[in-house]
Amino acid sequence: MQEELKVAIVQSDLVWENAAQNRINFTKKINSIVEKVDLVILPEMFSTGFTMHPENVAETMQGETVQWMKQTALEKGIAITGSLVIEDNKNYYNRLVFVDPDGSIETYDKRHTFTLAGEDKVYTAGNSKLLVFYKGWIVCPMICYDLRFPVWARNVENYDLLIYVANWPKPRIAAWDALLKARAIENMSYCLGVNRVGNDINNYEYSGHSAVYDVLGSKISSISNDTEQIELITLSKSHIKKYREKLQFLEDRDAFTLIP
């Protein structure tokens, strides 16, 4: 078990529906990290932007972007995660891919597709949470709109780190800020959100606000709100243990069963 987990938040602009250029850009950003890190986290649909035209950009799990993630993980000795558009069995998914340093892969399909943008019309929703066991840490990764649904994220598994990768627009960024903090407090876990910046082809503006909150809801990151930036944050197991044992709030959580 590893006491500390060092994560790299990569808050970035995205090139619209251009996976090759986005891979080049993220390669440069990851190569610029000189400190040893355990996990690099990219935004939602990091290879394309939040497109509602998956037929233009969809890849398979054997495609170039997943292969790039595997190669990067192997070469750098890191885990890397983010979501991208995947075609699988004739369906399109907004799929988070988590690649271990050994190149092994775990995936999570976005449960709550964003109806306001019509994501539910073109992407198939997932129905299973993912728990990643990495270096003694239990990580629960989710995607953007999932943040608005606390039952889906409820910490019944005693995970240590809740992650949201996102393309969350500026007009509703106050909700992003509030809900990331709330998810940390109610689940007594670290909660980390990675959002993009810049404008997409539809002229939607994204203002970043990527952040990390500890189990008490204190913000422990200092990334600038609306600029491309990489921030390294060290998470501590002893912090989680101290406050869970002292406060024991999770012992009073309600029992429930989710219906798919």
Image (cartoon, rainbow, N blue to C red):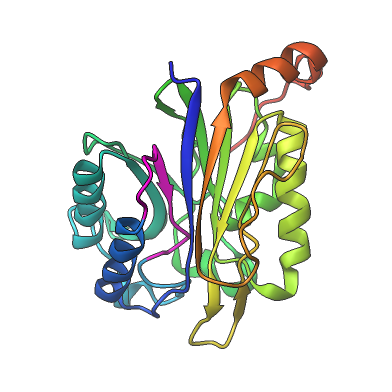
**Residue 147 position (above or below residue 37):** below
Q: Closest to the observer: 226 or 98?
A: 226
**Residue 130 position (above or below residue 112):** above
Residue at x 53% of width, y 46% of height: 142
- In percent of width and height, residue 120 lies at 54, 64
Of all residues, the one furthest to the top in this rendering is 245
- In percent of width and height, residue 226 lies at 62, 72
Residue 61 vs residue 108: left or right? left
Query: Most prominent secondary structure in the magenta stretch?
Result: loop
* Total numbered badges shown on the rendered structure: 0
Residue at x 69% of width, y 36% of height: 214
Q: Could you say which quadrant of the image residue 100 lies in? A: top left
Residue at x 82% of width, y 16% of height: 247
The magenta segment is: 33-46
Mark yes or no: residue 97 visible: no
- In percent of width and height, residue 218 lies at 76, 40
- In percent of width and height, residue 235 lies at 56, 33
Residue at x 44% of width, y 72% of height: 49
Inspect the magenta stretch and tell me whether residue 37 lies in it: yes
